[in-house]
Amino acid sequence: MQTSTLKQAKLVIEKPPLFEPLDPPSRLLCGPGPCNPHPRVLKALSMQEIGHLDSAFLHIMEETKVLHFCDILGKLTMNSLYLSLVLDQLNWKLAFNLLEPGDKFLVGCNGYFGHRLVEMGHRYGASVVSLQVPWGQIFSAEVLEEHIRKHRPKVLALIHAETSTGACQPLKEAADICHHYDCLLVADTVTSISGVPLHIDQWNVDAAYAGSQKCLSCPPGIAPLTFGPRALDKLRKRRCKVKNWYLDMNLIASYLNKNGSRSYHHTAPINMCYGLREALALVAEEGLEQRWLRHERNALLLWKGLAELGLECLVPQQHRLPTLTTIQVPKGIQATAVTSYMLQNFGIEIGNGLGELEGKVWRVGLMGYNSRTEVVKTLLVALQTALLQQGHSFIRPSFM
Ligand SMILES: *Cc1c(COP(=O)(O)O)cnc(C)c1O
């Protein structure tokens, strides 16, 4: 009896450890996001934990907001009336605190993310009108004006950089039209922030939210969000409280923005704030305009290489995002076979088409840290090899 128990005990000891050491594969992330974080950001993430009400942490948060004010969201000055926040990833949805039940909400749907906002608007009890153009196109000022005049919405939402199609929606005229008709403009700037020219205050965008995992080159988990004076006024005058306590902007604003003293609302994502702080410092060091130019330069290099491979982009160049390119899948090529081949043989991730564009395009992101010449060259060689495997033929391109 005793011997067999001992034997069993021995067996247990000889079992391999339950968990292998954590070892995620090395990838070059050139899809629609996330992209590879900058090494300095990764280092910042692993720094020591401090309490979220510790004055040292409050200092880091204030600093993040200052960097964020001055260098990221256009040319905001310290005494601007904009309220900018850094929140955990899901909390950019706070931008939709601007909606109250029954509010008319006009959404520009020219891709997947617009459709997502329609769904969100319904859940907030808004009266949603979805304005549609074919995927890959943008909304002209005339079309926007016609529909704003017709529907008189309280809020219009537009996707500045539609990651499902690669189209860049101009915002300035849209904001002017909105204000003429007493409507607020909310912009999704997730894939444009720090990669594409964006001037929140000059253009008078009322509220904008972004993400960390695209051109800011920080892992997902934190999100910048900003409200202008008109939006803040609407928030203050809400007739009813936001249903979700965690997502009540008025509660969160008092937690984040009371100088010095903060009341507890939730535990901030402390290490993610370190990461974002470092990501913003990198933007400030490079210079915002320089960073926009770098994204443009590398996108031009990619587009030239694609043309040499006989590939066409979905979006005309004048509205094409430098941060995300949608490539049309040539006839006879199986889209997912190419993406799998690139991942398995080169460790390179590019995206498949989403929604309506599934099987019709590939999505290539050159965002933040990954917008580099050597990344473009590596990507083109891998794409060419994958296409050859699929029987696509072309003349020898110049990048080889
Ligand atoms: C990536 C992205 C988002 C946010 O995506 P999550 O997966 O919810 O973080 C939102 N809008 C656009 C345009 C995006 O590209």
Image: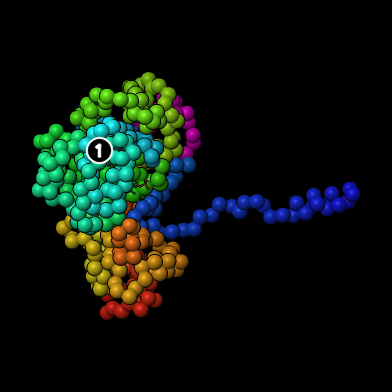
Q: Which residue is mark 1?
A: 127
Q: Which residues are magenta?
A: 47-62
Q: Is residue 335 above or below residue 158?
A: below
Element class at badge 1: strand
- Where's the C terminus, which quadrant? bottom left
Residue 361 lies left or right of residue 16; in this view the side is left
Does 364 lie within the magenta span?
A: no
> Where does residue 327 sit, x and y in percent of width and height?
28, 64
The residue under the point 77% across, 54% down is 11
Residue 87 lies left or right of residue 199; in this view the side is right
Can you name the residue that lies furthest to the top here? Answer: 261
Q: Is residue 28 above or below residue 48?
A: below
> Where does residue 392 sit, x and y in percent of width and height?
32, 77
The residue under the point 23% across, 46% down is 130
The residue under the point 27% across, 25% down is 238
> Where does residue 283 sit, x and y in percent of width and height?
29, 44
Residue 165 lies left or right of residue 279; in this view the side is left
